[in-house]
Image (cartoon, helix red, strand yellow):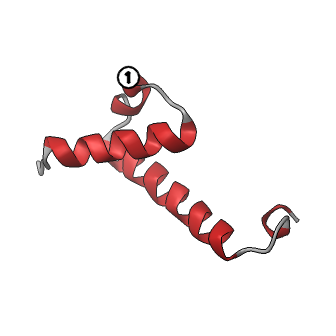
Amino acid sequence: MTTYSAERLWEEVVYVAYYLHWSHAEILDLDHATRSTVIEGIGRINTQLDGAQPNQMWR
């Protein structure tokens, strides 16, 4: 099993909490693979919105 630093885990928790307003416990209840998928999804949405015209994302 591979582990990573507590600092990295906190970065993930803060990122998800900021965008989805989930609690610390809800985020930590996710397994690493699911948490990574959520983070990637947030990143994709932000990237799309950054390059989109107003209301373009919701058509």
- Which residue has dot 1 on it? 25
Q: Residue at x 67, y 66 (%)?
A: 49
Residue 33 at x, y = what percent? Answer: 35, 49
Residue 14, above or below 46: above
For residue 18, side relative to residue 2 (left or right): right
Q: What residue type is labelled 1?
A: Ala
Q: Residue at x 45, y 42 (%)?
A: 16
Considering the numbered disc 1 on the image, is that residue within a helix, a strand or a loop?
A: helix
Residue 43 at x, y = what percent? Answer: 50, 61
Residue 44, above or below 18: below
Answer with the quarter of the image where residue 24 lies: top left
Residue 30 at x, y = what percent? Answer: 38, 35
For residue 7, side relative to residue 12 (left or right): left
For residue 12, side relative to residue 37 (left or right): left
Residue 36, above or below 21: below
Residue 32 at x, y = what percent? Answer: 31, 45
Q: Which of 50 and 33 is in front in this view?
A: 50
Residue 6, above or below 41: above
